[in-house]
Image (cartoon, rainbow, N blue to C red):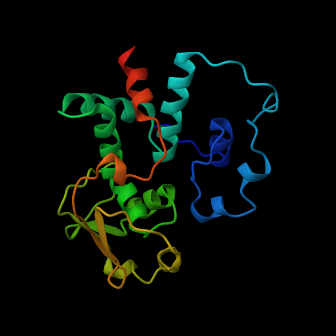
Amino acid sequence: MSRYTGPSCRFCRREGAKLFLKGERCNLEKCSFERRSYGPGQHGQGMRRKQSNYSVQLRAKQQLARIYGIREGQFRGYYREATRVPGVSGENLMRLLESRLDNIVFRMGFAPSRKAARQLLRHKHVTVNGIRVNFPAYLTRPGDVVAVREKSRKLEYIQESMRRTRDVVSWLSVDKVNLSGTVLERPTREEIPTVAEEQLVIEFYSRV
């Protein structure tokens, strides 16, 4: 399975917006987007052409997929699920993305970014309801208890992430002493801080 190993900041420059893919570094002056906010590549500083509706929808989809670190096949699967269940499809899509275990680990503060959260999961540092889970796309449910394994709680990487000030979303509760947290409920769109135009994503997939 293919995996992108290039610079993450290239995605921010391509989308013309900060995607906060590198955690705390994105808030520092050394952030690549702050120094070079134009697009990457030889023609990155050229004038942007007027975008078609399709191009606008594609960029919205690419931006959301890159924020959550999801490949095309997975993203299409989330779209199908979002349109299958009752409710507003765009909000359903955002709720599914936020329910991913790598996102929950990031939101709880155990990792500085979603990419770092995926690394913690793959190295089996996290449990769900007392069971080790190393699958980043695992979908959590209300009542699930997500915790750092007892043997992993002293890792400096995790401790450093917990020391950084970060607001916890209202639909999660976090015990910073025991490095555990609980999914209280499914979030509404207003409770999800991710800046995205999810309706454009729904329109993009509905036309193909």
Point out the image quarter for the C terminus. top left
* Furthest-front residue in this view: 190
Point out residue 132 in the picture as x, y percentages from the top left corner: 27, 65
Image height of 87 relative to 137, above or below: above
Q: Report if residue 183 is visible in the image.
A: yes
Relative to 63, residue 102 above or below:
below
| Numbered circles on residues, count | 0
Residue at (44%, 84%) from the top-left corner?
A: 154
Residue sitting nearer the eye, 121 or 44: 44
Among the 4 quarters of the image, the one containing residue 133: bottom left
Residue at the (39%, 14%) spot, across then down: 207
At horizontal 21% and vertical 58% (from top left) the residue drawn is: 185
199 sits to left or right of 62: left
Pinpoint residue 87: horizontal percent, then vertical percent.
21, 34
The residue drawn where x is 74% and y is 24% is 48
Quadrant of residue 171 within the rendered picture: bottom left
From the top left corner, tell me how far across and down residue 194 is, in percent. 45, 49
In this orientation, does residue 7 appear?
A: no
Placement of 142 over or under 69, stated as above or below: below
Quarter containing the N terminus: top left
Residue 193 versus residue 37 in the image, above or below = below
The image shows residue 61 at horizontal and vertical percentages of 48, 31
Q: Is residue 95 left or right of residue 57?
A: left
Q: Nearer the viewer, residue 81 or 189?
A: 189
Residue 20 is left or right of residue 92, and the answer is: right
Would residue 1 be found to the left or right of residue 93 on screen?
right
